[in-house]
């Protein structure tokens, strides 16, 4: 990882087409402006992680996973408990 020290108003370049500008520093927060081509997708990392978590949750467990869980529950149920068939 490259660590850079910059002051308010200073910037740095990534390749020739992305510029990151330090626009404000206040306490433990830094505001960064990003100049990049419109074709670049720029997302906060926590947003990407939330999207992935939601995507996996919506997918739900597979039939094999559900069957395995049901078998584990049947084996772990104490004798004489639960509904009678």
Image: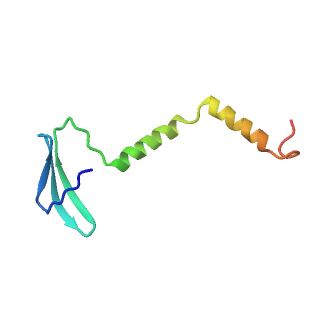
Which residue is drawn at the image coordinates 34% and 48% (left, top)? 45
| In the image, residue 85 above or below residue 7 | above
Residue 54 screen position, x and y as percent: 46, 42
Q: Nearer the viewer, residue 82 or 1?
A: 1
Residue pictured at 27% horizontal, 50% vertical: 1
Q: Position of residue 53 (x, y in %)?
A: 46, 43
Which of the two residues, 38 or 72, is positioned nearer the viewer here?
A: 72
Q: Which coloring applies here? A: rainbow
Q: Is residue 85 left or right of residue 66?
A: right
| Res 74 quadrant in image | top right
Q: Is residue 59 above or below residue 77?
A: above
Q: Residue at x 12, y 54 (%)?
A: 11
Quadrant assignment for the C terminus: top right
Q: At 11% from the left edge and 40% from the top edge, which residue is drawn?
A: 16
**x, y percent for residue 75:** 78, 40
65 or 81, nearer to the observer: 65
In the depicted structure, whether residue 72 falls above or below residue 5 = above
Q: Is residue 73 left or right of residue 81?
A: left
- Left or right side of 55 for 30: left
């Amino acid at each position: 990882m490259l660590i850079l020290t910059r002051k308010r108003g200073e910037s740095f370049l990534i390749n020739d087409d992305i510029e990151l500008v330090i626009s404000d520093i206040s306490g433990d927060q830094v505001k960064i402006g990003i100049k990049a081509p419109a074709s670049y997708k720029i997302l906060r990392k926590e947003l990407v992680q939330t999207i992935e978590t939601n995507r996996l949750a919506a997918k739900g467990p597979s039939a094999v996973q559900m069957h395995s869980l049901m078998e584990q529950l049947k084996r772990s149920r104490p004798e004489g408990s639960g509904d009678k068939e």
